[in-house]
Amino acid sequence: MSTPNTRRDFLRHVAGASAGLAVAASLRAAEPAKGNGVVGLRAPALERVRVGIIGLGARGGGHLATLMTLDGVEIVALCDNHPPTLAKAFARVEKAKRPVPASYGKDDNDWKRMLERKDLDVVFVVTPWHLHAPMGVAVMLAGKHVFIEVPIALTVEENWQLVDTAEKTQRHCMMLENTCYGREELLCLNLCRAGVLGELLHAEGAYIHDLRSQMNEVEHGTGSWRTPHYAKRNGNLYPTHGIGPVAQYLGINRGDRFDYLSSVSSPARGRELHAKKKYPANHRWNTEITSWTGGDINTSIIKTVRGRSLMMQWDETSPRPYTRLNLIQGTKGTFASYPSRLVIEGETKSTHTWAEGETLEALFKKYEHPLWSKMGDLAKANGGHGGMDFVMLWRVITCLRQGEPLDQDVYDGTSWSVLSPLTEWSVAHRSQSIDVPDFTRGRWEKTAPLGIVT
């Protein structure tokens, strides 16, 4: 989905994204809870899930392909304001021999007309970041459940708008954090819930991924709208892939919550050097962007109300191998990824060396999450980041058809996404700590941790 804003308007939006954060956070923190909100929300079961998708580029096209493989799904409407992308999506539908959905894409506001349909149950929002929250609010007000790509919102106030609207309409609002459904993440969740690692004390999550190649997408595609974010914003712009799984391990919003954070960024070097090296002097990235302020790597420390600590990192610029860290440390053991490592006191040979090889694989088999045991082969066969995309969408559709609560709710999506503007504020204020809003309004104290779903 292309951004409908002019570049000037877009850059102004990005530059002002973190204004007034401390005020917004403190004003909202005092609001009392009304009922259960959407904790454990059970919407009426849907025999068939009638789906609309807004944005059919890389992620949206992938979701369309996966959804068409799932039982009980009817693709009702497709929307994208980029005609070639929309045509490619319809070609996918035709190839899959599925009924032809309605088409929306005649202008930048056609998605609003799509929401007027009475035969839509859910809408997937897979658009540029600054459209996520406005579209999500509109979808819920139109009486439909919404599933939004990461991050769910850009500002503190946008996050509150999503929470307020979800509670008012009693509609599901889930951020599509796929990393929570990877084999290792599910296995680690199982370890934590079984108490194998003891009392959980510390976690680390990251998104380290060299994505400078996206800058080749100049007029259309992810790089065309993400690159100005990297230039104008200084903080952790993409926290949820690393923080989502470890937040589930720790029971964030379910017995504990984020209390405050402090953040630092490195100098901004990589993107500017890449632009000068790869593109001519009159190229967009060397003319429209005259200064690059976003640090190449951001590191943040988060403290929870229960006293646990988290380290969170983000870097989409440096020549460094991919990692999400995915580390959880307890009183009896530690699990970490990239590469996979595990030590369990009394079960592995030593606490001074990681279990590896056959020993590690035996532990993986012993503590495999039942959902991956059930779905793993099918997930890998259908692809999508090693199968996690398939498992995520299978769970979404299964929960909707059975009228069950989702694994992630609006409180999760907002609590994970709001870390981004808060890191920007902290970096801009000499790494001062800033409180994390309690989007649950105190409900976290009585909400049980996410269980081991099958």
Image: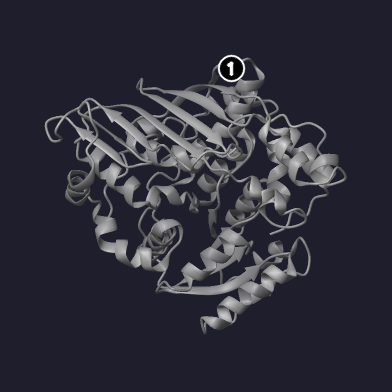
**Which corner quadrant holds the N terminus?**
bottom right
Secondary element under disc 1, as helix, strand or loop, is loop
Residue 423, image x, y percentages = 58, 27
Residue 242's place in the image compared with 90, above or below, is: above
- Dot 1, how many residues are within 10 Å of its Cα: few (below 14), some (14-19), or many (20+)? some
Residue lying at the far right of the rendered structure:
282
Q: Nearer the viewer, residue 117 or 308?
A: 308
Q: Is residue 377 left or right of residue 135?
A: left
Name the residue beneath numbered marker 1: 431
In the drawing, does residue 374 fall left or right of residue 385?
left
What percent of the width, then of the height, locates residue 67? 47, 69
Residue drawn at (65%, 49%) of the image: 213
The type of residue carrying mark 1 is: Ser
Q: Residue at x 64, y 64 (%)?
A: 115
Comparing 29 with 80, the one in front is 80
Residue 193 to residue 303: above or below:
below
Residue at the front extreme? Answer: 277
Question: Is residue 433 shown left or right of residue 330?
Answer: right
